[in-house]
Image (spheres, rainbow, N blue to C red):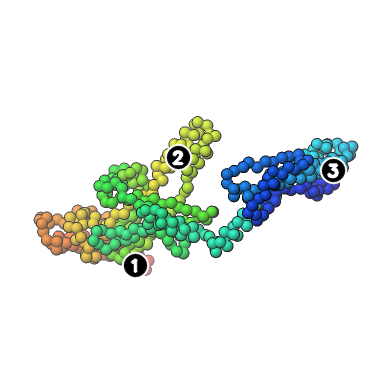
Amino acid sequence: PSSYTSDLSRDDSTFNPILPLMEDRSERSSNSEGEVVSGSMIKIKVQSHDDSTERTVLLSSSDLTKLTNEHARSLQGVLETCAGAFDASEYIVTTTAEIELGVVLRNLRCLSIQYGETMNYVESMMERQLVAAIGKRLTQDDLQTYVRYHDARLLSPAPKPFSLSIRRPEHYPTGLVSIETVDDKNDCIHSHSRQVNVGSMLNIALNSATQVQLSGNQYLHGWMNHRFGADKKNHRLVARARQFSAFILVIGTMTDGTTLDPKDAIIVQDKDELLIPLLLEEIPTAREFKDAIKSLSPEQQRFAQAYRSMQLSSSVFGVCVVQIKPQLEALLGLPADALDKEMKLTQDLMELFVEYQVPSDLLSYNGHSESAALEDKIANVKANVKAVMDVIEYQKEKQLKDERAKADMTMRIWMI
């Protein structure tokens, strides 16, 4: 049986009608469409369409009938040959029907392989023609350039780079926030933006007992990420601060239109550069999600819908920027722009608040007149800062003296 099967597997005389036929013709003879193929077991008739280009590209009905009948004739011949060469007396298990089934299955496998190779050949040929027409092989960067070019021509307003300056009106920028690609170019993404919630407050819950309300401009940005095949670029949030400048960066998710759920916060100051990788996850579209849960049970569908609702509720990425100088001025009771040129005072205040957690009551303006001159208010705050700094320096010197005394005592005990 093994020798008979191997001889049968080497027999490949069946005609394979699947071929990538390329024919350059502008007109088709009307006689070929109505030609009658005599002695045909299978007749194929191509449906007529209004598009004349489609009719000239497809094979005629007579050609398709000839190819199909030749395949059927050759397959019938192979079946008869195998059935005639099979001796049932030599085999106990194998029968003629099983031999014929094996021949048909092997032919189907050959047809499937030939179809895959044909499609690969056609796609490869079309790819070579497209590359020759464009002049280069396209990459992810080329797709981004193409989309941005057409967006600028077709959309109004066009998407703009997500690179936002942190500044107060009539002031020099204190920093920059952007979303960039992680590559050699570090290009910014292009997004649509629109100001929302004009005049409303943004709520940020720092903990269960503290909630902050922030006023200022709020913008909604929309970004469409285009992907070229399997290529996928990584992105990161970049925050940069200028020298003698500082701001607080808060990131989280928007739970609703006026509430930001903070995840992390950091102070960016004095030429710091903060790079935060963004982990982007794609969720199915509404149609894809509906098709995916169609075969699930009602209980599973409700769970999937509830989980998707949770995903969508936290899919809006929120970034909040709080400038520190205006908040320090309000906290210390100083007029607006009072600390613009007080660099040393601002640095000392940042050190006291961040490193030593000094209460603001010890540093704020405590004069008796609110209409005092700006220089008097700043002098009062400087005096308060100096008093606290002197206490800190005294404590440092005292701790250092105590440590030296302990070290000397330990040395004397060791010498004794």
**Which residue sits at x=17%, y=60%?**
381
Marks 3 and 2, Cα distance to the nearest angstrom?
61 Å
1 and 2 marks in contact (CB < 8 Å): no
Residue 292, percent across and down? 52, 39
- Residue 412 is tagged as 1
Residue designated by label 2:
308
Q: Secondary structure at mark 2?
A: helix
Q: Which-is-in-front pick, marks 3 and 1?
A: 3
**Which residue sits at x=70%, y=47%?**
32
Q: Which-is-in-front pick, marks 3 and 2?
A: 3
**Location of residue 410 (image quadrant):** bottom left
Does residue 132 appear to the left or right of 145 in the view shown? right
Does residue 369 appear to the left or right of 399 in the view shown? left
Q: Amino acid at mark 3?
A: Thr
Marks 3 and 1, Cα distance to the nearest angstrom?
111 Å
Residue designated by label 3:
81
